[in-house]
Amino acid sequence: MSSQNAAAPTPVRRTLTLFGFFAMTASMVMAVYEYPSFGTSKFSCVFFALLGGLFWFLPMALMAAEMASVDGWSEGGIFGWVSNALHNERLGFMALFFQWFQITVGYVTMSYVIIGLLSEILGWPALNDSPGLKFVAVLVIFFGVTLLQLGGTKHTAAIAKIGFIVGILCSAIILFVFAIVYLAQGHPVQIRFGARQFFPDFSQMGTLTIFATFILAYTGVEASGSHVNELQKPGRNYPLAMFILVAIAIIFDSLGGISVASVIPEKELSLNAGIYQTLDYLMYVDTGRTHHLTWLLDLVCLLICFGVIAEIGSWVVGPSKGLQGSAWYGLMPKWVSHQNKYGVPTFMIAAQFCVVAVWDAVLTFGGGSDGNMSFLIATTLTSLVYLVCYLLMYVSYFRLIYTEKELKRTYNVPGGTVGKTIFACCGLLCSLFAFAVSFIPTSALPVSDGARFVVILTYCFLGTVILAFTIPAFRRHYLKKLDPSEIRVMHFRLLWRRVPTIMQDAVDAARKRNHVTEVDGHLVQMLEDKNGEKNRVERSDRFEDSGF
């Protein structure tokens, strides 16, 4: 059942396979270049991977699977989930905007990884060290990846499949094989393995920060939700893809962190070039301290670069497509809804490129390589707004399981209401913890700059929240620019008695398609359950609760 207008833009065919969807989602979450960061926690990285994976990643994946399977909620990913659950499109837009906002910085930092590896492969240090050259390189990479996405989701999925296989699976397996050979040959191991090393010391502030890092490393699992209406058999394939992803991510992140930590001493480990550093040393030692495998080192680094390109590509269209959809609901100007013949939001992607160019200038010329104030505030700000996005998602899920039980869905989180509550509480507490820890100044800053960091970060965060509320504040103006046949109607609005005049035609058409009728003076919807029995659905008629 869909609440989308029949006259809205061309319906999307379900051409996305299970593996294509899985590869797109995995490319957003898994990254080989993050292994050095995990390795800083030594053997405890396994504990952190399990803790973050089971108490944050798994609950989020399961929740996303259930919300994506609710009838009428498949439109727009997190935008539709939050809007329908909280009966407020503006809060849904806020979650979507934050999801998009955080990745605009991520495009730059991911491009940095490609630039760093290419500078090593080409023996061209200036590519990574010269701010001007680095700035241009980021724009070239992002522009090229963006062009590759203009062919539609089918092309994006194809790139994601190849990128996941060669850039994540193959490169990670090669790393693991060389690490196993290293250990089998009896070379020195830089960490200890044991129960005392497995459990970290949570009395140390650094331990809390590391745990928050693992939580943030798992973000993005919900971002592919905007493609769920293109997925074949979404009721079965979406939760299946989530389960597979959680298992693989935990295993690979644990093995990757141990591989790096076992070889490179903590004091010598570079977080930016750590994966190249580890592979270089492993191939040198495993071959009898010769440089016969430099060609393989370069090849693996190229594979990692391709994996990062696939990650960027998977993100380019997802959140932008969600913002494009919000324009059809009157939450952004009409020009945002423009798309090419493949359904790609071209105008929104062009605007995204401009925003990325601004972040590129801020992070590159602001001294990103030195970890100074501007770089740290920008990256921390994106973590904060993304966590707010997740907090809205958790609140929405609580609303779904307690007040929207009658809504038909093809997947349920195991354990009934009690199990769902436990899963959601685990994820919510982890998100609140990571949000609080994000305000703690990093050791990369001088102690004297700590207070200034917190003040500037707080102002920037509040400014971003205000921006997210301001954009949809002109909704009535946006709606006037749309033809009534173009206006989309959020599913929850089908049973609201009062409707703004400008949306009346669109709401009437949506009600007719979704079998909403008036019975005894009330709007009701008759839904069939799995046994074929019809159930009557009825909600409040109060316009002030409609979220308009």
Image: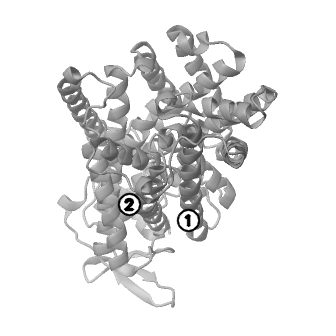
Q: Mark 2 points at which residue?
A: 507
Location of residue 463 by image quarter:
top left
Secondary structure state at the residue bearing disc 1: helix
Location of residue 121 by image quarter:
top right
Location of residue 450 by image quarter:
top left
In the rendered structure, find residue 243 and report the number of the disc placed on it. Answer: 1
Query: What residue is rendered at 52% in x and 37% in y?
Result: 36
Q: How crowded is mark 2: few (under 14 residues within 10 Å), some or many (20 or more)?
A: many
Q: Where is residue 282 in the image (x, y as percent from the top left)?
A: 68, 36
Q: Where is residue 391 in the image (x, y as percent from the top left)?
A: 30, 53
Q: Is residue 319 visible?
A: yes
Amino acid type for the residue under numbered disc 1: Phe
Q: Where is residue 150 in the image (x, y as percent from the top left)?
A: 65, 35
Query: What residue is rendered at 58% in x and 51% in y?
Result: 255
Query: What residue is rendered at 32% in x and 52% in y?
Result: 431
Dots 2, 1 in contact, CB < 8 A? no
